[in-house]
Structure formats: C-alpha cells, structure tokens
Amino acid sequence: MWPFRRNTKASSERRSLPAVLRARYDAAVTNDDNRRHWANADGFSASAAASPQVRRILRNRARYEVANNSYARGIVLTLANDVIGTGPRLQMLLDDGEDEGVNGLIEKEFVAWAKAVDLPGKLRTMRQSRAQDGEAFGLLFSNANMDTPVKLDARLIEADQVTTPLMKLPTPAFVDGIAFDEFGNPSQYHVLDYHPGDSLNMVPLAYRVIPATSIIHWFRKDRPGQSRGLPDILPALPLFAQLRRYTLAVIAAAETAADFAAVLFTDSPANGEAQTLEPMDVVELEKRMATVLPDGWRLGQIEAQQPTTTYGEFKREILNEIARCLNMPYNIAACNSSGYNYASGRLDHQTYYKSIRVEQSHCEAVVLDRILDAWMAEAVKVYPELAGLEDWPHQWFWDGHEHVDPQKEANAQAQRLASNTTTLASEYAKQGKDWETELRQRAREMALMKELGLTVAQAVPAGAQPAADPQNKDDTGDEQQ
C-alpha cells in the first residue's frame, strides 16, 4: 500500500477561507401569502414619503373624518383639552428674592398678554391641527392695535399655506416651503398669502418669505430627516372609515327588516294545494285587525341576520385600536368607563398621563419657549426694570389631573411629605400650581383667620376634615377644647 500523504498546503488554504453564514429573517421572505400585504412597502426617504401630494390627501381625509365622525372629533378635542387644558402658567426663577420684584412683574404682564391674544385657545387649536393635519404653524409679528404694552401677536397658519407654488423638487436645502441652512436648520418659510382652497384666492402664486425666527412649527418627527408632519391619527383613518361603514350596515339591516311588517310563506311544494297568490303582492294592514290567511300559507316576519349582538364588542375593539396610536386608553377615547374597575382605570391612565407630560414638554421646547423669547425681546424695550437681562430662567405649570379617589391621594400626599420623599413644590406642580403663590395665599388666609378670631376648624366647610391649627394650642402643646 502506498502511504497516504496529506496535502497540508491545501488544508491550510481551506482553513483560512472565511465561513459563509446563511441567515435569513422570516419577515424578509416574500411569498404568495404575503406578497400583496407588503406590496406598498418602499424605501423612500422621509421627505419623499411625505411628499406634498401625499400630505394633502392625508390632511383632507383626516379633516373629513374629524368633521363627520363623532368619535374622531371627540378624540381630537379630548387630546387637545388634556394636553393644553386652561393653558400653561409661567413662573420666573430670577434670583430677585421678592414676589413683587422682577419675577412678579414678568409673570403678571405675561398673563395679561396671554389673555389678550388668547394663547390657551390658540395652543388648543394648534394641538388639534397637529392631530388632524400633522403639523401646526404660528406666525409671530408686531401688532400695533394690541391693548397690552407688549405689541407681540401670534397668528395661526394652516399647513396648506406653507408651500412654494412653483414646482421645485426637494433638496437637502429645500423641502416644500421650508429652506434650510448648511447645518440643516430651517432658515426661511414660504407662506402663501391666501389659502389654496379659498374661493377668494385671487392671486394663487403670491407668497411671502418669512425668516424662521418668526415662525413656530410644531410637529412630531418620527424619522430622521423628516421636515413636515403627518397626521397623528394617520394609522386610524381606515379604522374610522370601517367603524362608520359597519354602523351604517347594522342600521341598514335593521331598517330592511323593519320595512316588512309581515310576509306570507308556505311549506307546500310548488304544485301543492296552497291557494295561489301573486308574488310580491302588498297588503295594507290595519291596527288590531283579526284576519284569516289563505289556505296553505303562514304569517311571519323578516329577521335581521346582521350580527347586531356583536356590534358593541366590535366598536369597543376598533376604538381601542384607534386610540392606541395616540397612547389614549379606551375609556377616554369612548368616554365610557362602564367596563373598568378602579385599578384598571388608574393603570390605563398612568400610561396616558405620561404621554401627556411628554407632549407638554415638547410644547414647552418648541412653542412656549419661542414665544417667551419673542415676548421678552419686546418687553425689555417697554419695562426699564428688565433692562440688562440676558437670560430669564423659568418653568411652566400645566393643569393637574384630578385623582379618582381624592381622599386616598391626600393621605398618600401627606405620607410623602412626612417621610421627606417629596416637596411642596413637587406636589403643587402636580396640580398645576405655583407653590410660592399658594403658600403666600395660605399665609394671608391664616393671618385673616387670626385677625377675625377664627380657628381652622371653624373656617373649614362642613363635612371636611380640618388640618391641625398650630395657632390653636396652649402652652403645653395640647389643642384647646
């Protein structure tokens, strides 16, 4: 036998070749079962996917649903009311040490200005526009007709007006009415003088170029490089249509069955002994009438075969799916908590309220801080006390959320304060209140009660539990009887 010689060179070459891994994902496989489902999947960029034509169609359909669908209108209104509420409240944090100093002056004048321009109402409108249009625009300008010392004003602009009427392909420096600088930040906005759908639009191509410092653009950026917004209720638009179609189908089935008061039918064969009647003949019936039917015929009614017993369950499931894209629980979307208990209601609300806090934080950064900067730039020209200010630290307070069980929440709040795991500032902030303002108000109340000779127990309304009155103690520390 010839001795076996191993080719060590070939073996080493085979060992040095990289191994080829063949891995695949089931979701990446295209077959006959999923081909139609993934037919519309594309690789467009954020700007190309949200082209002007696509956004126009989505805006029109979302507005149609909100205008004609009661649930869509209620969901959008509820979302705007919960996010904005009665409006944000400003607290300045300048280190002046006095409430009536610079902090108090700015807060007082800003509140008066916000009321004059109806800032809370405009913010609610912006939030509704963001939900149905995908984005909201505001124009900051000087209005000499304002009754306040600061002449700053804010005017809302619909998304349809922020565009360039000339045909222009999107580029890194320009996307449908928005021009960007070399760093990718908006530098200019092109705003039409008239709404493109206005019947009085005499000059459709007329537009103005407005610097980005005067425009507020509020939208949710879902993709890197996205420059224009899409409706928040976008994934729910087909579901709203299905809900309306199913409701109309159930009603139509019930009406069809109700249109036939009674029908005559027979079990006899075609050539049987039943008396001959004309098919589809109509007989008018009288109330409380007794009659005799023809030979071989029986009286019956048409029953709606539509599964109306599952109508409520269908509406619940589809509304739950609709509200999910807004992080809104079913009982808030449907305004119906009949199927909830206390624990499940609180659990669902926690996720929703966290989403609301995120929305409010985004509104502060994108809208409110921009408005405050513009207001302060004008206010320093009017009030000498503000001269020399280069920075104005502040915070915003929003409406608090009412607790389902106020007594339990009050007990928990007292325990947190007693264990030093919270602060008065934090607890008041949950209610949308300024702790300094509230404590000063409480001090004035206590001083007035002492002046009038009232105790805390006497000042508390009937049925409420009075708090301990530190002024109503004797020298031994025991409360007076």
Image (cartoon, rainbow, N blue to C red):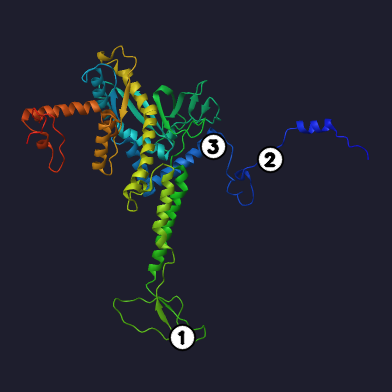
Q: Give the foreground label among 3 and 2.
A: 2
Q: Secondary structure at mark 1?
A: loop
What is the quadrant of residue 359 in the picture? Answer: top left
Say what amino acid the circle numbered 2 marks. Answer: Arg
- Left or right for 425, reference 139: left
What is the quadrant of residue 305 in the picture? Answer: bottom left
Q: Compare marks 2 and 1 and give the one earlier in the sequence.
A: 2
What is the quadrant of residue 207 in the picture? Answer: top left
Q: Nearer the viewer, residue 149 or 456?
A: 456
- Left or right for 301, reference 386: right
Q: Is residue 199 visible?
A: no
Say what amino acid the circle numbered 1 marks. Answer: Ala
Disc 1 target residue: 274
Disc 3 target residue: 49
Q: Are marks 2 and 1 in contact (CB under 8 Å)?
A: no
Say what amino acid the circle numbered 3 marks. Answer: Ala
Q: Secondary structure at mark 2?
A: loop
Q: Give the foreground label among 3 and 1.
A: 3
Which numbered disc covers residue 22? 2
- Residue plotted at (88% across, 35% down): 5
Q: Position of residue 257 (x, y in %)?
A: 40, 68
Q: Nearer the viewer, residue 477 or 368?
A: 477
* Residue 112 to residue 315: above or below: above
Q: Position of residue 94 (x, y in %)?
A: 29, 18
